[in-house]
Image (cartoon, grey):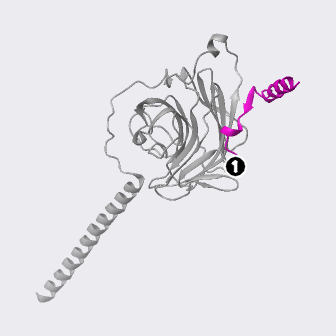
Amino acid sequence: MSLWLSFLLVSLAYAEDGIFFLRDNSLVAPFAGSWNSYGSTVLTANHISLTTNVKGATGGIFNIYPLYSRDWEVRLGFKVHGSTGSMFGDGFAFWYTQDRIKPGHALGGAEHFRGLGIFFDTYNNHNGEHSHQHPYISAMVSNGSIVYDHDKDGTHTQLAGCHSSFRNHENGAQAKIRYEKEKLTVYIDVGAKSKWTECFSVHGVKLPTGYFLGLSAATGDLTDNHDILFLKTYDVHVQYTAEQLLEDRTLIEPFAATAEAEREHIEDTNRPSRWGKFAQIIWWLFIVTLFVGGCCIAYYLYQGRQSRLKRLY
């Protein structure tokens, strides 16, 4: 009887969209239990602050339990907010990695990793031919041999990406990250209005089971508040053959068939930061003011001398 009851409960749990909520791998209020944090991260009653609006902050939080689902979906609620102008940064990242995420230069996480990183990048560090509009959401899969390059916004290693104006919405935004039958799809709901749009979808992505979920964020000279409202993880029910079910997914190598081809890493031409540009403008205005002021003083001195000479003669 208990066996049939268990079967019925599992069937009902998968009834909605064929997914089953995984509490141990989820991060919901009151934000206690199966997650550890580092850096500037602060847990509040209704959200997790990865960074506040201060310079040079790095924060992160990671699940202490591995995720063993072969197919899964993560629904992420977040709020990135701060300046209403163009001076803000740097962004936050979602992780599914072999090791629990550690601090680093990949939007608050380690740039060397094995697994999946999805980057919600708000500041354009790169001005080359692969530059794109920000905020920008992109994905990267690494087997540990390739590194996320923050100074190039990950353009050398990304699978796919899209522009999304997810900053400064009163209700924040939501992302849906779905991994099913080796296909990675990311949807975004700007303003948390339950209006989902597909950001990108990539086939041929191989991710092992038993990796760890995590989140990280960072600020630099420019700042933002990076708040996490929730992270809900679901097992996705998918039909497989008996042979497929026998495969040990913990042993496969992280791989993406559509990763960008290796290309020469050409340094950008020297480009000042936004603050640098502003400082340059102020500097040139100062030089012009000195020059004009000097010319005016010289002119008045010259006129005064001419007047004195006329009186003498």
Residue 50 in the image, given as x and y percentages of width and height: 57, 51
Residue 183 in the image, given as x and y percentages of width and height: 59, 23
Give, as a single range, the part of the protein colored magenta. Answer: 1-30
Quick one: 313 or 124, which is closer to the camera? 124
Q: Determine the residue located farthest toward the left in the rendered image.
A: 313
Residue name at image x 29 percent, y 64 percent: 287
Instruction: Please give left or right for residue 171 compared with residue 149 in the image.
Output: right
Q: Quadrant of residue 83?
A: bottom right
Disc 1: CA contacts within 10 A as few (<14), some (14-19) or many (>=20) = some
Quick one: 75 or 302, which is closer to the camera? 75
> Relative to residue 179, is residue 47 depicted above or below?
below
Quick one: 8 or 150, which is closer to the camera? 8
| Secondary structure at numbered mark 1 | loop
Residue name at image x 66 percent, y 31 percent: 73
Residue 48 in the image, given as x and y percentages of width and height: 63, 51
Q: Is residue 181 magenta?
A: no
Q: Quadrant of the N terminus?
A: top right
Kind of residue at disc 1: Asn
Q: Mark 1 = which residue? A: 171
Residue 288 in the image, given as x and y percentages of width and height: 30, 64
Q: Is residue 20 magenta?
A: yes
